[in-house]
């Protein structure tokens, strides 16, 4: 078989031919396709089981739907324009899919496809670094088996997942000397979430000082710093009326982006305790575990790009940012694989394979090939840390009222405003007003056209007593009529809808 070209110029010239003819590349394509289908099926099933939520699937689904209908995407769940959330302008091109047919499964498909297709630039970076065909495929498989990929896909939808393949593609483009493709890729990354501007800037520092890619490094630093300032100081405050929502997670450092940045520089003692806490060390260890074989201080330079995301997660007062369940660690993933690939490209093996004096290898034969070892370790990490077990446990919690909830939803015939539970809300977000029940913020029920409540499973930020109280209030109101009741699921319709 033809040897893979390592030189950047030959790589660019021969890459299309390899995509079409090389059996190993075809293997990567099959893996990507299978992974995308599995991820899409899992997120769709979770949603069908009423395990998704208004935060965050409902927010993005409602925003994209309103954009597709030519309406102002003011999300009723958060109370402001969708750009006031994370300045994620990529939601606008996503709305083109909703113009074909408005359905939340577009978001699941885009998310699954983005997470899966990132294996292609992982493979490309590995091959460009000089890894063998089998090792390149193995590294791509290790990426697809990383527990964070599977778990983040299950956690509703977040536009920053689309930044993962774009960021990896940008790095591959920089190494190939394709400045135009690099610029387009980082522009897309910036449009996925404002805070990713810090990751882009850090990537530029690494490219400039360690990879000697002056043009790409300079572009990334300039674009990252400029967009972070524009998004955090202009776009988000303009559309939301305040500081970025995540600022509240760093209240001990300040009440604004600039104050937090100042305290990080001037008062390092405030953060040292969090950085070296047991919880932070455990979080970093679990994140790195699937590629621990490829991490060595000698090849840590690519991890410069991961510093902003790691710092934000470690310093946050929210423990949700320090686990492998949510999406917050995704910007770290590309740089973990860059560091691992850098070590593998030197020819170092994760385990010794030389024979002892007796002529017998000290390790089992299955470990003699690095690609087999990488795959086996990745599979063990996936089995230990991926949350596939949720489908047999917590994801079945509301199965006893599943049919009743589905039937109640089908009785909502108009685009009128809806008050419902947090987990039911993303099934009803194709309208201008939808809200979920919240104990800390009791709703004014007369403002809604429909009230759909599940007393047995009242949802996040609600309780059975609170939901039962709302049911009693609606029953005693002349404005509402109970039109559906089964298994403690209640649907009330306002007189405004009935008379209309």
Image (cartoon, rainbow, N blue to C red):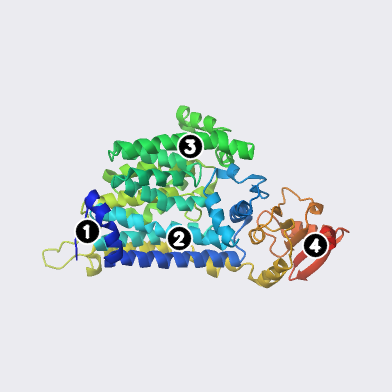
Residue drawn at the location 79% of the way across and 50% of the way down = 444
**Sequence-first tag of 2 and 3:** 2
**Sequence-first tag of 1 and 3:** 1
State the quadrant of the C terminus.
bottom right
Where is residue 123? Give x, y as percent: 32, 57
Circle number at residue 4: 1
Residues tagged 2 and 4 counted as in contact (Cβ below 8 A): no
Instruction: Report which residue position mark 3 lands on.
Output: 227
Instruction: Report which residue position mark 4 lands on.
Output: 493
Where disc 1 sits, the SS reads: loop
Above or below — where is 491 with respect to 314?
below
Residue drawn at the location 60% of the way across and 54% of the way down = 68
Instruction: Report which residue position mark 2 lands on.
Output: 113
User: In whole angstroms, how far apart are the C-alphas of marks 4 and 1?
Assistant: 65 Å
Q: Residues within 10 Å of mark 4 (few under 14, many from 20)?
A: many
Mark 4 vs mark 1, foreground winner is 1
């Amino acid at each position: 078989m033809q040897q893979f070209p390592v030189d950047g110029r030959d790589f660019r010239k021969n890459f299309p031919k390899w995509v079409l003819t090389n059996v190993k590349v075809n293997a990567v394509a099959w893996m990507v396709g299978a992974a995308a289908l599995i991820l899409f099926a899992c997120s769709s099933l979770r949603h069908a089981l009423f395990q998704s939520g208004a935060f965050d699937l409902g927010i993005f689904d409602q925003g994209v739907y309103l954009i597709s209908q030519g309406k102002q995407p003011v999300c009723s769940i958060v109370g402001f324009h969708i750009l006031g959330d994370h300045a994620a302008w990529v939601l606008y091109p996503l709305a083109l899919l909703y113009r074909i047919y408005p359905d939340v499964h577009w978001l699941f498909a885009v998310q699954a496809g983005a997470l899966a297709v990132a294996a292609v630039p992982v493979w490309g970076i590995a091959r460009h670094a000089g890894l063998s065909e089998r090792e390149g495929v193995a590294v791509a498989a290790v990426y697809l088996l990383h527990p964070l990929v599977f778990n983040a896909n299950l956690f509703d939808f977040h536009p920053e997942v689309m930044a993962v393949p774009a960021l990896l593609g940008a790095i591959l483009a920089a190494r190939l000397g394709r400045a135009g493709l690099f610029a387009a890729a980082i522009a897309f990354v910036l449009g996925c979430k404002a805070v990713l501007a810090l990751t882009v800037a850090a990537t530029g520092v690494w490219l400039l000082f360690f990879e000697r890619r002056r043009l790409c490094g300079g572009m990334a630093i300039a674009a990252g710093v400029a967009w972070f300032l524009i998004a955090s100081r202009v776009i988000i405050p303009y559309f939301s009326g305040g500081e970025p929502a995540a600022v509240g997670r760093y209240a001990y450092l300040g009440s604004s982006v600039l104050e937090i940045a100042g305290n990080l520089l001037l008062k390092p003692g405030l953060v040292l305790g969090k950085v070296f806490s047991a919880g932070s060390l455990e979080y970093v260890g679990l994140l790195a575990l699937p590629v621990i074989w490829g991490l060595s201080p000698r090849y840590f330079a690519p991890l410069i790009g991961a510093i902003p995301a790691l710092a934000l997660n470690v310093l946050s007062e929210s423990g949700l940012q320090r686990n492998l369940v949510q999406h917050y660690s995704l910007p770290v993933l590309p740089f973990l694989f860059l560091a691992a690939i850098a070590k593998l490209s030197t020819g170092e093996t994760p385990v010794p394979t030389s024979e002892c004096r007796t002529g017998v290898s000290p390790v089992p034969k299955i470990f003699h090939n690095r690609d087999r070892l990488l795959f086996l370790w990745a599979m063990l990490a996936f089995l230990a840390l991926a949350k596939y077990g949720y489908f047999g446990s917590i994801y079945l919690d509301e199965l006893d009222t599943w049919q009743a909830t589905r039937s109640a939803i089908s009785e909502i015939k108009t685009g009128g405003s809806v008050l419902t539970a947090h987990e039911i809300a993303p099934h009803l977000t194709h309208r201008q007003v939808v809200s979920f029940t919240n104990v800390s913020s009791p709703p004014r029920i007369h403002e809604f056209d429909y009230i759909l409540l599940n007393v047995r499973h009242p949802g996040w930020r609600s309780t059975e007593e609170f939901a039962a109280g709302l049911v009693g209030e609606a029953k005693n109101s002349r404005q509402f009529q109970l039109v559906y009741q089964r298994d403690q699921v209640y649907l009330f319709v306002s007189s405004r809808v009935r008379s209309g």
